[in-house]
Amino acid sequence: MPAGLRREAMGKEFTELEAWQKAQKLALLVCREVIPLLPAEEKYALAQQLRRAVQSAPANIAEGHGRYHYQDAIRFCYIARGSLQEALSQGKGWVEALQAIGATAAVLGLLLF
């Protein structure tokens, strides 16, 4: 089971999960720090796609945590990891702030596997 969702964590609220906390922090960082730095021509299409991808990760972690079977939780962690990869691929090369985000996403990726 992913490190961020170990068996002992299943009795906790999703907000207590380290993986969810880091995913939420990443989503806030991207929405507050990165998206405003995007070039004007990318403010709508790329910003929307980046925002949806990064906000999907904590949502999927929370949804997986709410499932009764641990295999469902794992499946939602895979989906969250895919959303993180999507966000990283959308933002690569746009802003130096993505280096900090990449480090945060890497830590989160380790928690999800």
Image (cartoon, grey):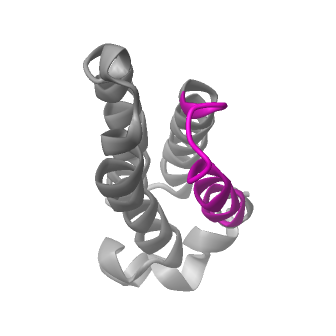
Left or right: 102 in relation to 56: right
Could you say which is closer to the camera, residue 99 or residue 22?
99
Quarter of image, res 68: bottom left
Quadrant of the snapshot with the N terminus: bottom right
Residue 30: percent from left, percent from top:
40, 50
Identify the residue at the far front of this view: 40
Rendered residue at 25%/19% (across/down) = 44
Residue 60: percent from left, percent from top:
39, 47
Relative to 80, is 91 above or below?
A: above
Left or right: 37 in relation to 82: left
Q: How many marks?
A: 0
Rendered residue at 55%/85% (across/down) = 8
Residue 91: percent from left, percent from top:
55, 32
Left or right: 1 in relation to 77: right
Visible residue check, residue 65 = no
* Residue 94 within the magenta-colored segment of the rendering: yes
Could you say which is closer to the camera, residue 34 or residue 48?
34
Span shown in magenta: 91-108
**Magenta segment main secondary structure:** helix
* Residue 100 within the magenta-colored segment of the rendering: yes
Residue 48: percent from left, percent from top:
28, 25
Visible residue check, residue 34 = yes
Relative to 82, is 74 above or below?
A: below
Could you say which is closer to the camera, residue 84 or residue 50?
50
Relative to 87, is 113 above or below?
A: below
Rendered residue at 51%/35% (across/down) = 83
Quadrant of the snapshot with the C terminus: bottom right
Relative to 83, is 74 above or below?
A: below
